[in-house]
Image: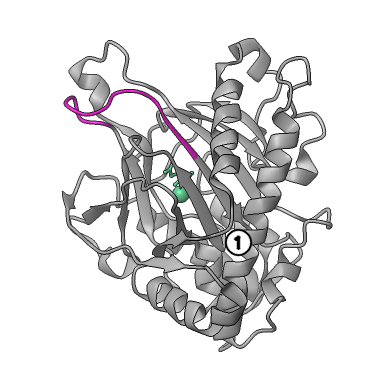
């Protein structure tokens, strides 16, 4: 009983915090560290130190020489465009069910920070929940194979990064790999394909609102693929988000990098040492590129039955399923 109360309070604190962050704020330059993963095994200690520094200070970093071939990333974007070009009736055969992170939604995700739906459509792939959610080979030939391979490539990279955090937290090197085991029915990493809608014949009032309202991610670690020319992502470090007007930093898409951020689950797992950072995608201004934005985030979310407990036991243990339940019920998805 007591533990349920504590869990509930924790969820409410997060929700209340997020609900105050919907304003436009101002802009501030900050450095988003770039971390080179080349020669990973030999340089692991140094890489782990750099990741730790970035994740404790700003909660965002960009990976270079990360090992996912650019051709594979480009291919995933091409198939993403093909998916969203399907007729709405076809996409509607694969609907997202609330709270599942699997399937298609159109302008349905409402963020507590804004209270309005994000100006986007998305299709989410969470492997154990996909039985009825893949478009058929007739509808979209090649899609499933491309996305399964891309999902696994992101998972492998995410586990590499998480093994560095395991090292720094004093866990076994494969601690997080086991907690994100894709062979388990409890697996819940998610590959999300996002299409932010283009501004077509837009009136001034269409430029209000958000492509993605301010939020922190619920997961351990997010790997985000952006396309050069399709910007809008902004961050605000948690330590500076203490109320009042927030200062936001642009994170423009750069060729060859994967943008990463720490999520709430790893923040809790690290006893709040690693920083889950607020971010959002703003609407373009009238003088900017007005076409669509496509992005591909991969969310490393621990298996439902993984127990989250930090090295210093700051919080009581909680299963990843219970933890997410609190966070997801704060959102409409
Ligand atoms: O599209 C982006 O750049 C960010 C998406 C995002 O933050 C999310 O889906 O959680
Ligand atoms: Fe996010």
Q: Is residue 56 left or right of residue 39?
A: left
**Residue 95 or residue 74, whichever sits in front:** 74
The quarter holding residue 242 reads bottom left
**Residue 331 or residue 139, whichever sits in front:** 139
Look at the image and give the residue range highlighted in magenta: 284-295
Q: What element carries label 1?
A: helix
Say which quadrant the C terminus sits in: top right
Q: Overall secondary structure of the magenta stretch?
A: loop
Q: Is residue 310 visible?
A: no
Residue 164 falls within the magenta-colored stretch? no
Q: Is residue 307 left or right of residue 236?
A: right
Say which quadrant the N terminus sits in: bottom right
Disc 1: which residue: 158
Residue, x 65% and y 84% (percent of image)?
A: 171
The quarter holding residue 142 reads top right
Residue, x 59% and y 34% (percent of image)?
A: 75
Q: Is residue 39 left or right of residue 182?
A: left
**Residue 24 or residue 145, whichever sits in front:** 145
Q: Where is residue 181 in the image (x, y as percent from the top left)?
A: 77, 62
| Residue 219, above or below 43 | above
Residue, x 21% and y 56% (percent of image)?
A: 246
| Residue 74, above or below 311 | above
Q: In this view, does 309 lie to the left or right of 233?
A: right
Q: Position of residue 44 (x, y in %)?
A: 56, 80
Q: Position of residue 204 (x, y in %)?
A: 18, 19
**Residue 64 or residue 85, whichever sits in front:** 64
Residue 294 falls within the magenta-colored stretch? yes
């Amino acid at each position: 009983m007591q533990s349920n109360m504590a869990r509930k309070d924790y969820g409410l604190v997060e929700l209340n915090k997020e609900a105050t962050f919907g304003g436009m704020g101002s802009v501030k330059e900050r450095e988003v560290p770039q971390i080179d993963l080349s020669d990973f095994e030999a340089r692991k200690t140094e890489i782990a130190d750099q990741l730790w520094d970035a994740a404790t200070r700003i909660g965002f970093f960009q990976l270079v020489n990360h090992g996912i071939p650019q051709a594979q990333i480009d291919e995933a974007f091409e198939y993403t465009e093909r998916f969203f070009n399907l007729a709405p009736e076809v996409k509607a055969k694969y609907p997202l069910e609330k709270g599942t992170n699997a399937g298609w939604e159109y302008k349905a995700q409402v963020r507590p920070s804004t209270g309005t739906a994000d100006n986007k459509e998305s299709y989410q792939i969470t492997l154990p929940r996909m039985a009825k959610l893949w478009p058929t080979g007739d509808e979209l030939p090649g899609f499933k194979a491309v996305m399964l391979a891309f999902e696994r490539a992101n998972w492998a990279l995410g586990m590499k990064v998480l093994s560095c955090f395991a090292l720094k937290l004093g866990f076994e090197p494969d601690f997080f790999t086991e907690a994100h085991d894709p062979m388990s029915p409890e697996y819940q990493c998610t590959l999300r394909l996002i299409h932010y809608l283009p501004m077509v014949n837009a009136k001034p009032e269409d430029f209000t609102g958000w492509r993605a309202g301010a939020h922190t991610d619920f997961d351990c670690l997010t790997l985000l693929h952006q396309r050069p020319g399709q910007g809008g992502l902004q961050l605000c470090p948690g330590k500076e988000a203490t109320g009042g007007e927030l200062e936001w930093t642009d994170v423009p898409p750069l060729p060859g990098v994967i943008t990463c951020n720490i999520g709430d689950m790893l923040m809790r797992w690290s006893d709040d040492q690693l920083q889950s950072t607020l971010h959002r995608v703003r609407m373009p201004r009238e003088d900017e590129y007005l076409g669509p934005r496509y992005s591909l985030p991969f969310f490393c979310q621990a298996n439902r039955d993984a127990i989250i407990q930090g090295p210093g036991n700051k919080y009581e243990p909680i299963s990843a399923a219970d933890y997410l339940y609190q966070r997801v019920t704060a959102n409409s998805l």
